[in-house]
Image (cartoon, grey):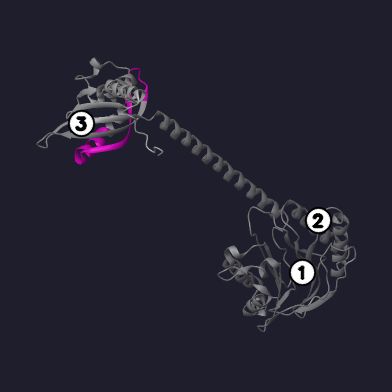
């Protein structure tokens, strides 16, 4: 039968020799030697703190002799100034109250003045009648732990500094982007005789350059041009296209203010510039305003290149989209057809232009529904008859309500004819 245990065979002389040698080693490994050469420091103190016993390990750490310590020093004499204060205010009171305390971080002071971090655990030994006799304390070398903690602290400080610098860099970048973004938009809208105007630009992210744009400028003493659009993409490339688009439309309008002609010129410029390599295009509405002072009305002529239709808010409380048939994305084909549309603004009427950041804002609890054209029509109807500034204020509140559902930048431009009461 096969043996499964490892007990020594009493009949085997070699097993007897091994057992005797191990037993002899155990006898030599006395309790006193274990105490003296333990990997941690041991000491026993009287209740007043006087050191009565200390092992060689702790004496080696301190660099002191047994004669200089036993009966001559107290436990607190081994501690740094901060360690003494902590011992008196926390360690000793808790020890008296609980009878034991463990794992407390302290620092001992070596003979050469060097500080050494330790973890201290103490227990009060009581006599047969319950009276406290002495305090036994164990000290564990915490230098490796302290080095690890200091390394963690240095790493944390480095991470905090890197985060601070990153935030500062981000703030500077946002300032630079805001300055660049503002350079792509007019500082103020020029005064138009017989017309009120209001505009608003809302960026979806301060860390990205948007491609939305608008402008209003005079053509001559009586006529004004306006445009609003959205360049495909974000970032510096989109900003370059926005700048080119804005100045191209201005130059084209001064040469020929017809909206179809202006968009045709822009289409040709964008297609020639970006048809090879990285194609760039935009959507845009371009129009002209021609006030008729005797009637108080304003004639509007406009054309659209793939842009959401303008809304006309009437003084009678109605609102509807202004049809702009045809009109491909500007710059995508060498020859794009554009169609002229016209309307007349009477006192109390307002023309509203917007980019698709408004209608494509995500709504609902799940943020999966789009705001949409019909919701915008209903919103415009509720504010029909109000001035452009009042309409813009209401739209600003609407954008605020979208919160994080506003994924894209939004540009708004409202042009309206004041009522007779507003002109008084």
Residue 54, given in percent of the width and then of the height, sits at 25, 22
Q: Is residue 181 visible?
A: yes
Neighbour tally class for label 1: few under 14, some 14-19, many 20 plus, Cα within 10 Å: many
The mark found on residue 307 in the picture is 1
Determine the secondary structure under disc 3: strand
Q: Nearer the viewer, residue 200 or 126?
A: 126
Q: Is residue 258 visible?
A: no
Residue position for label 2:
244
Return the x and y of residue 171 as percentages of the image width and height: 60, 47
Q: Residues within 10 Å of mark 3 (few under 14, many from 20)?
A: many
Residue neighbourhood size for the residue with mark 2, other residues' Cα within 10 Å, grouped as few (<14), some (14–19), many (≥20): some
Q: Is residue 58 above or below residue 148?
A: above
Tell me the residue that label 3 is attached to: 135
Over which residues does the magenta segment extend?
87-115
From the image, which quarter does the C terminus lie in? bottom right
Looking at this view, is 86 or 317 the one in front?
A: 86
CA gap between label 2 and label 3 equals 85 Å
Q: CA distance from mark 1 to mark 3?
A: 86 Å
User: Which one is in front in this view, the residue at disc 2 or the one at disc 1?
Assistant: 1
Figure quadrant of residue 376: bottom right
Secondary structure at numbered mark 1 = loop
Mark found first going from the N terminus, 1 or 3 = 3
């Amino acid at each position: 039968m096969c043996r499964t245990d490892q007990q020594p065979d009493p009949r085997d002389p070699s097993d007897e020799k091994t057992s005797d040698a191990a037993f002899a080693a155990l006898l030599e490994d006395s309790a006193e030697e274990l105490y003296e050469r333990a990997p941690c420091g041991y000491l026993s103190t009287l209740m007043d703190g006087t050191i009565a016993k200390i092992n060689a390990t702790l004496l080696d750490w301190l660099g002191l002799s047994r004669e200089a310590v036993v009966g001559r020093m107290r436990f607190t004499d081994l501690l740094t100034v901060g360690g003494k204060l902590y011992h008196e205010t926390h360690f000793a009171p808790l020890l008296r109250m609980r009878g034991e305390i463990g794992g407390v971080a302290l620092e001992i002071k070596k003979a050469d003045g060097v500080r050494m971090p330790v973890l201290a655990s103490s227990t009060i030994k009581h006599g047969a009648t319950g009276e406290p006799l002495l305090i036994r304390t164990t000290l564990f070398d915490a230098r490796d732990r302290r080095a690890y903690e200091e390394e963690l602290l240095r790493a944390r400080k480095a991470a905090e500094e890197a985060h601070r610098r990153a935030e500062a860099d981000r703030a500077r970048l946002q300032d630079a982007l805001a300055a660049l973004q503002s350079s792509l938009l007019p500082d103020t809208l020029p005064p138009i005789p017989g017309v009120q105007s209001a505009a608003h630009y809302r960026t979806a992210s301060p860390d990205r350059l948007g491609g939305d744009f608008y402008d209003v400028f005079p053509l001559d003493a009586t006529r004004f041009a306006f445009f609003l659009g959205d360049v495909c993409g974000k970032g510096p490339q989109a900003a370059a296209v926005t700048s080119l688009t804005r100045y191209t439309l201005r130059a084209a309008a001064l040469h020929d203010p017809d909206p179809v002609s202006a968009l045709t010129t822009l289409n040709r410029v964008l297609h020639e510039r970006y048809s090879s390599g990285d194609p760039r295009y935009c959507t845009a509405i371009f129009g002209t305003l021609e006030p008729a002072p005797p009637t108080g009305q304003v004639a509007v002529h406009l054309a659209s290149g793939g842009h959401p239709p303008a809304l006309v808010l009437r003084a009678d409380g109605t609102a509807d989209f202004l049809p702009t048939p045809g009109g491909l994305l500007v710059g995508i084909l060498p020859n794009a057809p554009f169609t002229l549309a016209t309307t007349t603004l009477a006192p109390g009427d307002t023309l509203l232009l917007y980019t698709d950041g408004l209608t494509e804002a995500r709504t609902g609890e799940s943020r999966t529904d789009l705001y949409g054209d019909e919701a915008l029509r209903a919103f415009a109807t509720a504010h029909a008859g109000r001035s452009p500034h009042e309409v813009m204020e209401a739209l600003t509140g609407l954008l605020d309500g979208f919160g994080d559902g506003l994924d894209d930048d939004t540009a708004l431009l409202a042009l309206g004819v004041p009522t007779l009461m507003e002109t008084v």
